[in-house]
Image: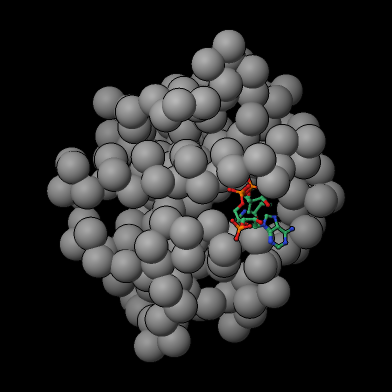
Amino acid sequence: MLPNATPRLRFREMSPDDLDDMANLLGDPQVMEYYPRPKDRPEAAGWIDWNLRSYADHGHGLWIITTHDGDFLGDCGLTWQTVDDTPTLELGYHVKSSAQKFGYATEAAVACREYASSHSLASHLVSIIHRDNRASQRVAEKVGMKLDRTLRHASPVHVVFAMDL
Ligand SMILES: CC(C)(COP(=O)(O)OP(=O)(O)OC[C@H]1O[C@@H](n2cnc3c(N)ncnc32)[C@H](O)[C@@H]1OP(=O)(O)O)[C@@H](O)C(=O)NCCC(=O)NCCS
């Protein structure tokens, strides 16, 4: 099962065949500005494996987002993360540098929020975001989340945005 296609985007599961695109995405210093460092190719392969395990275990994970013509744009989806020592459904997204600021992350994230809601995956949804990552915070706000300072993540430089589903 996948989130519904949107006017400009389609979702599909990641596969090992996506390694070139995912290594380019996660190896881009601009995309990874708020991560400890860009990921190398083996780490990008590990990212794909993590999502394959998530599909198998939970039926969802980060999915590849493409244009309707199949052009790779990035990933977006739903994974389980720990907030306040509790497994919590997280909405995540990464868009390649050349495709940023066209509204793609927001369009994909809304489709994932609707998927989480219609499949009753959880009672609330979070995004764990670096305190300085304004672009990601803005996407979370546009999806309907608000900064919730009562929720804590292990990383002291991250804040938690949240909403009820
Ligand atoms: C966060 C990210 C996914 C946003 O993707 P995008 O497709 O450019 O986002 P959108 O075009 O839907 O823009 C959503 C909002 O963010 C704003 N925005 C986008 N880039 C921005 C930036 N660099 N600084 C400030 N605001 C920004 C947009 O203006 C828009 O807000 P508005 O409607 O009020 O103008 C993208 O910047 C990215 O991949 N960043 C690196 C990976 C990352 O940090 N992921 C999140 C990890 S928590």
The residue positioned farthest toward the right in the image shown = 29
Where residue 115 sits in the image (x, y, percent)? 28, 40
Residue at the spot x=67%, y=67% of the render?
133
User: Which quarter of the figure is the C terminus placed in?
Assistant: bottom left
The residue positioned farthest toward the bottom in the image shown = 150
Report the side of 2 relative to 146 (left or right).
Answer: left
Report the side of 134 relative to 16 (left or right).
Answer: right
Residue 59, located in which quarter of the rendered image? top left
Residue at the spot x=54%, y=57% of the render?
139
| Front position in the image: 56 or 112 | 112
Ligand 1 quadrant in view = bottom right
Residue 136, located in which quarter of the rendered image? bottom right
Residue at the spot x=47%, y=33% of the render?
63
Rendered view: 82 above or below 20: below
The image's colouring method is one colour
Residue 43 visible in rendering? no
Rendered view: 135 above or below 99: below
Report the side of 63 relative to 26 (left or right).
Answer: left
User: Which quarter of the figure is the N terminus placed in?
Assistant: top left
| Front position in the image: 101 or 89 | 101
| Front position in the image: 107 or 49 | 107
Where residue 14 sits in the image (x, y, percent)? 50, 25
Residue 77 visible in rendering? yes
Total marks drawn?
0
Rendered view: 127 above or below 27: below
Where residue 84 sits in the image (x, y, percent)? 36, 79
Where residue 107 sits in the image (x, y, percent)? 48, 41
Residue at the spot x=18%, y=41% of the render?
119
